[in-house]
Image (spheres, helix red, strand yellow):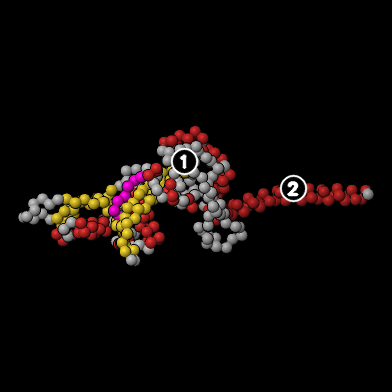
């Protein structure tokens, strides 16, 4: 999978194709985080093949729907349990992120894993994601923001428009 | 886009949740780097709803305070300057010349007067 742009959460329900032996096969549901529907369906079959004896060629997708966040404008803390392959083995991990929606938190996770562990998206499997109340968060980079009277200095920022103008007589404003 | 909004919550080191119901800014996450801080502070609880923000914003009359501030006027002047046509620039040059003519005339008159007075004083001595 290529974790391009912001990921979206898909709820995918699939089943084996009905046959003479099995008239109503059981439905399997998964929540997949992917950049688009096509990659979501692909990931669905990838996982389903691992867990159940059903392949894409012998199955069908009953539903593939985008799941939107219930409250996308409140800041939440998410705990993500994942499994990834490193260069010398496969490991479980628990990571925490602070974001507005589950999909954005998972996107952050993929970026973070790529940065800190050089893990490629195809090797990462999101096992579970849970919204956490503040007191259940364990990671200090998340709990440090659990302060209603939080304050930190806004350090000078670099000029974004370096070349507008490129040559000038006045110094750029680096304050906030 | 040069609009005022209120920081209602902090997401992490680089992003904040921002809201401006009275200034046509929808509630959204923004990067801190794309913001400039003003001196106006609203006493809110973190994550306050748009309704609360609007109530406090209107009661403190932030829009009016902002319109009267120098910062806002500078932005508006800059915007006007960027919209100038060649005819506007011609009018501006003429207006500047007329203004400077009046100022310089008065200044030179006072300077001359001062020179005459100084000459008188030295002569006396």
- Which stretch is magenta? A126-132
Q: Is residue A129 magenta?
A: yes
Relative to A39, is A79 on the left or the right?
right
The local secondary structure at tag 1 comes to loop
Query: Which chain contains the residue that carries disc 2?
Result: B
- Name the side, left or right, on which A86 lies relative to A29: right
Residue at the spot x=17%, y=50% of the render?
A: A27
Say whether marks 2 and 1 touch (CB < 8 Å): no
Instruction: Say the numbered circle drawn on residue A42.
Output: none
Q: Disc 1: which chain?
A: A
Closer to the camera in the image, A122 or A93: A93
The foreground one among A11 and A77 is A77
The 10 Å Cα crowd at callout 1, few under 14, some 14 to 19, many 20 or more, is few
Q: Of B103 and B33, which appears nearest the observer?
A: B33
Q: Label 1, on which residue? A: A148
Residue A6 seen anywhere in this rendered image of the structure: no
Is most of the magenta stretch helix, strand or loop? strand
Q: Nearer the viewer, mark 2 or mark 1?
A: 1
Disc 2 on helix, strand or loop?
Answer: helix
Residue B19's place in the image compared with A32, above or below, is above
Q: CA distance from mark 2 to mark 1?
A: 60 Å
- Residue A165, image x, y percentages: 54, 60
Q: Is residue A103 magenta?
A: no
Q: Position of residue B11 (x, y in %)?
A: 43, 47
Q: Which label sits on residue B106?
A: 2
Please name the residue shown 78% across and 48% down the image. Answer: B110
**In the orientation shown, which residue stands out farthest toward the left?**
A20
The extreme bottom residue here reads A87
Point 31% across, 64% down: residue? A89
Q: Is any part of residue B106 visible from this angle?
A: yes
């Amino acid at each position: 999978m290529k974790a391009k742009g912001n990921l979206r959460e898909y709820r995918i329900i699939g089943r084996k194709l009905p046959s003479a032996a099995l008239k109503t096969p059981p439905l399997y549901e998964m929540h997949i985080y992917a950049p688009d529907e096509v990659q979501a369906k692909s990931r669905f079959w990838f996982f389903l093949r691992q867990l159940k004896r059903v392949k894409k060629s012998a199955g069908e997708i009953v539903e593939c729907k985008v799941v939107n966040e219930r409250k996308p404008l409140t800041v939440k803390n998410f705990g993500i349990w994942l499994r990834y392959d490193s260069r010398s083995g496969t490991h479980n991990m628990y990571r925490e992120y602070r974001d507005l929606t589950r999909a954005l938190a998972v996107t952050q996770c993929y970026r973070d894993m790529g940065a800190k562990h050089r893990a490629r998206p195809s090797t990462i499997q999101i096992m579970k994601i849970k919204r956490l109340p503040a007191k259940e968060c364990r990671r200090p980079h998340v709990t440090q923001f659990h302060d209603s009277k939080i304050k930190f200095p806004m350090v000078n920022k670099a000029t974004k428009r370096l070349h507008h103008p490129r040559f000038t007589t006045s110094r750029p404003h680096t304050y906030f | 886009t040069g609009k005022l909004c209120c920081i209602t919550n902090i997401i992490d080191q680089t992003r904040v949740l921002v809201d401006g119901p009275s200034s046509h800014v929808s509630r959204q996450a923004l990067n801190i780097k794309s913001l400039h801080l003003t001196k106006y502070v609203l006493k809110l609880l973190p994550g306050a709803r748009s309704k609360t923000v609007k109530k406090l914003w209107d009661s403190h009359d932030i829009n009016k305070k902002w319109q009267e501030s120098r910062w806002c006027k500078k932005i508006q002047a800059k915007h006007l300057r960027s919209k100038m046509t060649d005819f506007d620039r011609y009018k501006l040059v003429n207006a500047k010349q007329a203004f400077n003519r009046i100022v310089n005339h008065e200044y030179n008159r006072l300077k001359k007067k001062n020179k005459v007075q100084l000459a008188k004083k030295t002569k006396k001595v």
